Amino acid sequence: MIGREVLYYCEDFEAAFKTYTKGFGFAVKAKYDFGFAILDAGGPCGIIGLMDKKHFSPNPPLDPSPTPRLSLKSEDIEAEVAGLIERGISVSEIKGKKESWRWATFVDSDGNPFFIWEGDES
């Protein structure tokens, strides 16, 4: 897995996008019509994913609430998920389509959520 971004969910995507870009001054790396943006806050770990909360689909207990979480990019999500399971980590089913974006969620021993994804960044 490659550390990628911190993911924030928002109630009003366009309002949040405006706050993060015009208010905070974060540069836009990408913005998608379905309510997702990748923003550059600067520095080596300054990537922020901003996602419209309506796209959050809970999968208790692996994804208890739409809270900020570390988002991890994978080149082979099936292998990563299999490896997590082999190491005793409970992981949600992989969602999405092979030819597009795919993702899964898991939590640490304290219930802190993680988001792992695979897909084209272009």
Image (cartoon, rainbow, N blue to C red):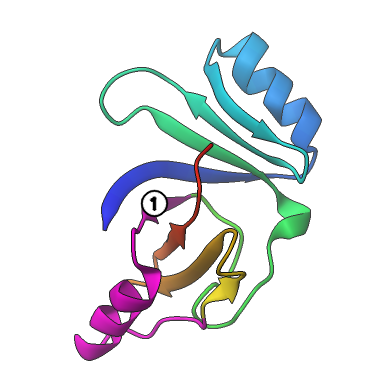
- Check disc 1 and give the amino acid type: Leu
Name the image quarter holding the N terminus.
bottom left
The image quarter in which residue 91 lies: bottom left
Residue 78 lies, with reference to residue 119, above or below; the image says: below
Residue span colored magenta: 69-93
| SS of the residue under disc 1 | strand
Residue 41, given in percent of the width and then of the height, sits at 43, 20
Residue 49, given in percent of the width and then of the height, sits at 53, 39
Name the residue: 34% across, 67% down. 76
Q: Is residue 109 visible?
A: no
Closer to us: 49 or 64: 49
Closer to us: 112 or 25: 25
The question of residue 111 being in magenta is answered with no
Q: Is residue 68 left or right of residue 66?
A: left
Instruction: Give the residue pinned by disc 1.
Output: 70
Name the residue: 29% across, 19% down. 43
The question of residue 88 being in magenta is answered with yes
Name the residue: 43% across, 43% down. 6
Q: Residue furthest left?
A: 87
